[in-house]
Amino acid sequence: MAQNTDLNIAANTWTMITDSDVSQITFQNKGGTHIMVKATTDTTAPTTFDGSIRYNPGQGERNALLSDIWPGLTGRDRVWVYAYGPVTVFVSHA
């Protein structure tokens, strides 16, 4: 299902920011601390930071293909955020 919204991300847990399989995404870290962002091939929450990317406050991606962000991961279609403190993340995808 498509979404275009702000999500409140709890601290110290992986939170899925996609609510369906996606190939492109727009997101922005609107919080005051950095976040880690990771793609997976299913709805199972990550257990490590391997393959994750750090985004500082104000950073994100605009209409980016998941295959461009994570070219080494085949079949990636879900995106997760890990925050070190509560943050808001804007997310938009079809």
Image (spheres, grey):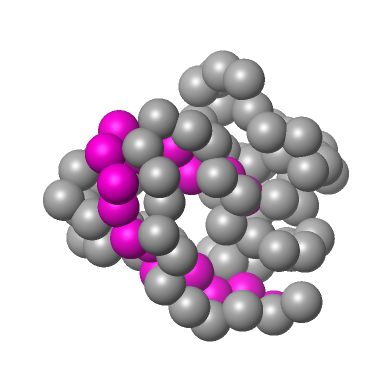
Quadrant position of residue 10: top left
Magenta span covers which residues? 79-94
Is 19 placed above or below 72 here? below
Task: Return the residue nearer the eye: 67 or 1.
Answer: 1
Q: Can the viewer see residue 62?
A: no
Is 3 placed above or below 17 here? below
Q: Give the percent coordinates (x, y) of residue 66.
A: 64, 54
Q: Give the percent coordinates (x, y) of residue 32.
A: 16, 51
Is 89 placed above or below 94 here? above
Q: Give the percent coordinates (x, y) of residue 80.
A: 57, 45
Q: Give the percent coordinates (x, y) of residue 91.
A: 49, 69
Is 19 placed above or below 32 here? below
Left or right: residue 74 versus residue 52 is right
Which residue reaches farthest left?
A: 32
Left or right: residue 30 versus residue 78 is left
Residue at (54, 75) in percent of width and height: 92
Left or right: residue 42 versus residue 63 is right
Residue at (76, 35) in percent of width and height: 44
Q: Can the viewer see residue 94?
A: yes
Q: Check the picture and name the quadrant holding the C terminus.
A: bottom right
Quadrant position of residue 35: top left
Dominant secondary structure of the magenta stretch?
strand
**82 falls in the magenta region:** yes
Left or right: residue 9 versus residue 45 is left
Quadrant position of residue 71: top right
Task: Return the residue nearer the eye: 50 or 15.
Answer: 15
Residue at (71, 64) in percent of width and height: 19
Task: Return the residue nearer the eye: 8 or 81.
Answer: 8
Residue at (76, 77) in percent of width and height: 1
**33 falls in the magenta region:** no
